[in-house]
């Protein structure tokens, strides 16, 4: 009698785990989105008290969104670094904004150089990576309100406002993140996978670092976008540059850029249509418009983990409501926005595809190598302290980049028997049994041999899937 019951429980367990994982996939982003928007509203209210106007408000909200996503406040070192760098970020925003307004071509040159530097710094370690992420913030703000004007009723001089807004954003984000951790609503931060040794996955030739190639790609895309915008769309160049920036940011290879470009265009099209529909029923009340913008950003932050298209939809809606429609009719503005977004996406995709291209398969193999190296270290008897932390972190990084490969596999399923997405899915299926093995403290020789075989197979793509399948069978057995 007990055997059938246990059999049914074991059969149902995967479905229970799937249901729980899907519920967590919605619940955790919802909690973090609520905390982010509460921090944004608190920062916004404080900012409007001493610096009323649209520009400080936009800076406050964008900084809260970016700081919450980067989670630089999760440790003391991150908070100190952000407290030092963010004021400088505010001053840079002022200077570049003035250049874009009065010396557009010089401003574009500084803009391109600043974003190039923010990406190129990634090659110098985690501290430089965090500094580069903070450096990129003012440029994103400038693209949302490229022609904003300071409010003359501000109580403080214009040069001091960005510094105070940055500190307020950091303070309120830290407060609400600490509250989440105190209430145990936010999981522990994953460790960075930087010191785990991995076998080489490419040939022995010296190549330009990926961060340098991505920086060059971003610079070329932005330069072309600025030229196209200034020459052909002088009054609405910002959407072209913004789209080129978005599709190239976080570049994980050509396939990732193509996937992100498609989602950006589709999401932006849906967001623009929704914005035009709302414009027919909205009044000119800035309070109502501001509430709708915050609501759109809340849904974008909540649903972003489920798909980049959601983020593109709601951010486009927020930007459309923020910038307004001017004297153009909603229908005319709809086609203008879609045209600019499509042009920016094409520019960004062309830059990633032809300028020092990064193969997405190489990036995937790098992530596979990191995960296998972490697993090898965790089950090595010579490792003094064996924990699953790095395995969990490396698997999470692998999972972050598989959506474009899933889309590619669906589109080419009739032409390819084996797809790189199969590698990632097979290794991710090893996650749960690997963690269970590590937590038991076991180091079976057959599993260590399977891990070593999979790491060696990274050099031979044809042998990689069978090796990963063998590893999975060893772990599950």
Image: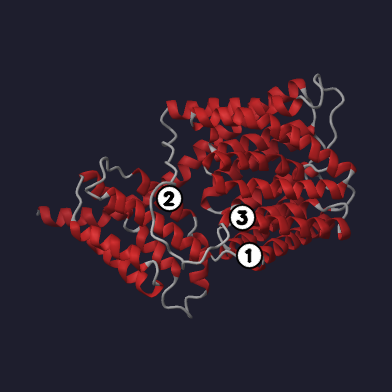
Q: Residue at x 69, y 29 (%)?
A: 87
| Residue denoted by label 1 | 356
**Vertical comparison of 108 with 358: above or below:** above
Q: Which quadrant: the C terminus? A: bottom left
- Left or right? Give the position of 436 relative to 323: left
Q: Residue furthest top?
A: 155
**Residue 262 sits above or below residue 124 on the image:** below
> Label 2: how many residues lie within 10 Å, few (<14), some (14-19) or many (20+)?
some
**Disc 1, SS:** loop
Percent position of residue 272, x then y: 73, 53
Q: CA distance from mark 2 to mark 1?
A: 27 Å
How is the rendered protein coloured?
secondary structure
Task: Give the mark nearest the N terminus, 2 or 1.
Answer: 1
The first of marks 2 and 3 along the sequence is 3
Residue under label 2: 396
* Disc assigned to residue 212: 3
Query: Residue 271, position in %: x, y?
Result: 69, 52
Q: Residues within 10 Å of mark 3 (few under 14, many from 20)?
A: some
User: Which of 132 and 435 lies nearest the eye of the viewer?
Assistant: 132
């Amino acid at each position: 009698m007990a055997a059938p019951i246990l059999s049914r429980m074991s059969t149902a367990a995967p479905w229970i785990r799937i249901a729980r994982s899907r519920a967590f996939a919605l619940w955790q982003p919802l909690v973090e989105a609520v905390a982010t928007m509460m921090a944004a509203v608190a920062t916004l209210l404080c900012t409007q008290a001493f610096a009323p106007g649209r520009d400080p408000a936009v800076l406050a909200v964008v900084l809260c969104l970016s700081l919450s996503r980067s989670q630089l406040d999760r440790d003391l070192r991150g908070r100190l670094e952000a407290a030092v760098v963010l004021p400088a970020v505010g001053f840079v925003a002022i200077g570049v904004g003035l250049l874009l307004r009065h010396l557009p071509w010089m401003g574009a040159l500084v803009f391109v150089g600043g974003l190039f530097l923010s990406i190129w710094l990634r090659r110098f370690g985690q501290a430089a990576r965090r500094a580069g992420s903070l450096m990129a913030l003012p440029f994103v703000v400038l693209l949302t309100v490229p022609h904003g004007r300071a409010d003359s009723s501000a109580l403080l001089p214009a040069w001091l406002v960005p510094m105070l807004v940055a500190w307020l954003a950091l303070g309120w984000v830290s407060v609400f993140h600490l509250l989440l951790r105190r209430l145990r609503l936010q999981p522990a931060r994953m460790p960075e996978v930087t010191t785990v040794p991995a076998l080489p996955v490419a040939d022995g030739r010296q190549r330009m670092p990926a961060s340098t190639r991505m920086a060059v790609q971003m610079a070329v895309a932005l330069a072309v976008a600025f030229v196209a915008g200034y020459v052909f769309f002088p009054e609405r160049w910002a959407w072209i540059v913004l789209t080129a920036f978005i599709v190239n940011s976080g570049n994980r290879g050509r396939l990732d850029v193509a996937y992100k470009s498609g989602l950006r265009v589709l999401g932006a099209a849906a967001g623009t249509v929704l914005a035009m529909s709302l414009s027919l029923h909205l009044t000119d009340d800035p309070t109502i418009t501001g509430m709708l913008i915050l609501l759109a950003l809340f849904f974008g932050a909540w649903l972003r983990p489920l798909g980049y298209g959601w983020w593109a939809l709601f951010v486009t809606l927020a930007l459309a409501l923020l910038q307004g429609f001017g004297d153009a009719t909603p229908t005319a503005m709809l086609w203008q926005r879609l045209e600019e977004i499509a042009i920016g996406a094409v520019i960004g995709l062309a830059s990633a595809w032809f300028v020092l291209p990064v193969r997405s398969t190489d990036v995937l193999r790098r992530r596979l190598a990191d995960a296998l190296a972490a697993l090898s270290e965790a089950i090595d008897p010579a490792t003094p302290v064996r924990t699953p932390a790095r395995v969990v972190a490396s698997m999470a990084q692998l999972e972050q980049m598989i959506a474009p490969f899933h889309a590619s596999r669906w589109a080419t399923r009739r032409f390819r028997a084996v797809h790189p997405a199969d590698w990632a899915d097979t290794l991710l299926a090893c996650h749960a049994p690997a963690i269970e093995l590590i937590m038991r403290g076991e180091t079976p020789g057959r599993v260590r041999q399977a891990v070593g075989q999979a790491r060696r197979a990274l050099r031979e793509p044809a042998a990689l899937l069978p090796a990963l399948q063998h590893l999975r069978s060893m772990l599950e057995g």
